[in-house]
Image (spheres, grey):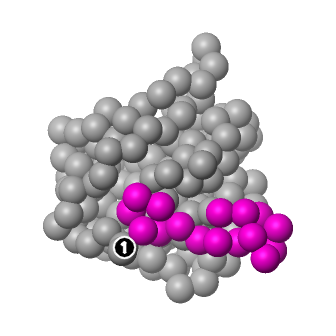
Amino acid sequence: MTIAVGEKLPEATFMVPTADGPAKKTTSDVFGGRKVVLFAVPGAFTPTCHMNHLPGFLDNIDAIKAKGVDAVVCTSVNDPFVMGAWSKATGADGKIEMLSDGSADFAKAVGLELDMTPRGFGMRSQRYAMIVDDGVVTSLDVEEAPGSATVSGAAAVMEKL
C-alpha cells in the first residue's frame, strides 16, 4: 500500500556517498526535525532523470529553500557510488543530498516500487516527489509514466510549498 499524506515515513536505511566512501543514514537522520523535499527517480543517468528531473531541482534549489525547506534530497535504486558520480557529474554535489536505496527497501516500504524487470532494469522506484515535515508526508505526487517528470518536477513542488 502506498504511503499517504499525513503518514510518517517508515524507518529505512540509505547509503550515502561521502568523501570517505559510503555511509549509512536512516530515515530519522534525513527527515527528522526538518522540512525536506524528496524526489525519487527510477535511475541515475537515465534520460528523463538526468536531463529533466534533477536539473529542475538544481535550477530552483535557492527558490525552494527560500520557501522554508531545509534540504532537497534525491533517492534512486542505484548504489552509492553511482549516486556520488551522478551528483558530481551534474553539479548537485553539496546542493542535493543523494540517497542510495540500492535494494529498493525504502521504495517498497513506502509502496512506490516499480518492477522494470521486463525491460532489464530490475526493481526500481517510481518517479515521485514528496514534501516531508519532521518525517511526516505533507504532499505526495507520483508520475503516471516513468518517462514523465511533470507532477514531480521542481515547478510543481514549488507550487505546493
Rendered location of residue 21, percent (x, y): 63, 19
For this rendering, which residue is in front, 86 or 67? 86
Rendered location of residue 112, percent (x, y): 47, 69
For this rendering, which residue is in front, 155 or 35? 35
Seen at 23% across and 71% down, the residue is 5
Return the residue at label 1.
Answer: 2
Q: Is 115 situated above or below 136?
A: below
For this rendering, which residue is in front, 158 or 83? 83
Q: Is residue 70 visible?
A: no
Query: From the image, which quarter does the N terminus lie in?
Result: bottom left
Residue 115 in the magenta stretch? The answer is yes
Residue 83 in which image quadrant: top right
Q: Is 100 situated above or below 154?
A: above
Seen at 53% across and 67% down, the residue is 113
Residue 45 in which image quadrant: bottom right
Q: Which residues are magenta?
A: 108-123
Q: Is 112 situated above or below 66?
A: below
Residue 7 in which image quadrant: bottom left
Rendered location of residue 122, percent (x, y): 72, 63
Callout 1 secondary element: loop
Type of amino acid at the residue the image marks with label 1: Thr
Q: Is 148 situated above or below 18?
A: below
How many circles with numbers are drawn on the protein? Answer: 1
Q: Is residue 95 left or right of residue 121?
A: left
Seen at 32% across and 33% down, the residue is 29
Q: Is residue 115 visible?
A: yes
Residue 1 in the magenta stretch? The answer is no
Query: From the image, which quarter does the C terminus lie in?
Result: bottom left
* Residue situated furthest bottom in the rendering: 144
Seen at 75% across and 70% down, the residue is 117
Rendered location of residue 34, percent (x, y): 22, 42
